[in-house]
Image (cartoon, rainbow, N blue to C red):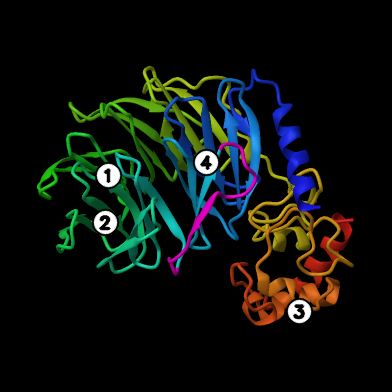
Amino acid sequence: MRKICFALLAIILAAVPAAAQELRGHGGPVRAVAVSADGKLALTGSFDQSAILWNLASGSAVKVLRFHQGAVNAAVAINGIGFATGGEDGRIALWRGDAAEPARIFEGHKGPVAALAVSRDGGQIASASWDETIRVTSLADASARVLEGHKGPVNGVAFAPGGGIVSVGYDATLRIWPPGDGAAKVVTLPAPQNGVVVAADGEIATSAADGRLRFFGLDGEARGEIEIGQTPLIALAISADGATIAAGGLRGQVALVDRKSRAIRANLIGPGLPVWSLAFLPDGRQLLSGGADRLVRRWNAVTGEHIGTVVPRAGEDVLAAFQGERGAQVFRACAACHTLTPADGNRAGPTLHGIFGRRIATAPGYAYSEALKGMDIVWSKETVARLFELGPNAYTPGTKMPEQTIGSAQDRQALVEWLEKVTR
């Protein structure tokens, strides 16, 4: 049944008119974007636990890919293979062509995969994880070298010329690892780091929580910095020729930076929502951005102009019609992950449409954790209220739902009565 649903979704997405320059299909923030070396295909990953393969010429979806149990946080193109994705579940999947199932799966991380990079010869893939490690995996024999040293989530990774590795993390360090087994050079920085890229000439650029883009040599020596904004930079990309760096922030700002002059030559004006992912097309003349509005937008990377009309979709308030209702107010904490109607589908969590009377872990098209599939719970006003009284970790152990409780019995009652009304 799930495969049929995914096939139907791909057909529906493919039917969207090609004139639309925005790629639409995800049900949650777009956390990852990668573009093939020939510029014909893109792969996007989302908080909704799916990846979508796109035909960039037509702007249509080729395939909806479901594998990860959790958000798809990272994507990278691999010449001669296709794409790789990294997820909240700690796994890495390799995708060939438009196959619906991964060609290979790499496991080993004990926390979410936050970033992926491919070596210049295409033989290795590096993964950064919130388990405080980087794994460098051979695509030939799946052997892996584990790099340890970060104290906290590792948010960015890149290959350096000569086969070395560069990584950054929440511990506010840049680490430059030699190709062999030697110790990393550690550069301590003023703020937590969220991303890193390396140019072909070896220059490193990092993006930080203080809104600054910093430059370094492979020896770790600082080469200057640029203030992009006052809020964290959460997306970073470099053009294939190394001339331009794109840095995106929490408030939707995206700056195009000329690497040689260290100057911002354009600011991309979007809907003002977080930009989570960026990727240049191979010629460097177009840029894709993925954000909290669930869309992938196209930009002219030369002029900084948006290709097509900017439509701030995520600004729509689906709960505006229920203003004054206490249950709707309580539900606002859930709205980022759950939808209420069949048309809106699944996001990070399953749709709540038809939830009452439904057995746990049975909403169509959603990738549930194995722990939930074995539980004997049918959702009713009583069981939903109990979930929020005890909290997901206690009531449904093994869930990926964020821990939250509703301490007020009146608020729990208002929520379940409102949900019963709007999810029929």
Residue to which mark 2 is pinned:
191
Could you say which disc has been placed on residue 212 in the image? 1
How crowded pointer 3 is (Cα within 10 Å; few <14, some 14-19, many 20+) is rated as: some
Which residue range is magenta in the image? Answer: 97-110
In whole angstroms, how far apart are the C-alphas of marks 4 and 1?
A: 20 Å
Which mark is drawn over residue 291? 4
> Which residue in the protein does label 3 denote?
386
Lower sequence index among marks 4 and 1: 1
Q: Is residue 128 left or right of residue 397?
A: left
* Residue 208 screen position, x and y as percent: 30, 50
> Magenta stretch: dominant SS?
loop
Disc 1 versus disc 2: distance between alpha carbons? Answer: 9 Å
Residue 214 position within the rendered picture, expressed as x and y whole percent measured from the top left = 22, 43
Q: Is residue 405 visible?
A: yes
Given the image, on which type of amino acid does mark 2 rest? Ala
Judged from the image, the secondary structure of the residue bearing numbered disc 1 is strand
| Nearest the eye: 248 or 174 | 174
Give me the C-alpha separation between circle 1 and circle 3: 45 Å
In the structure shown, which secondary structural element does the residue marked by tag 3 occupy? helix
Tell me which residue sits at (50%, 60%) in the image: 91
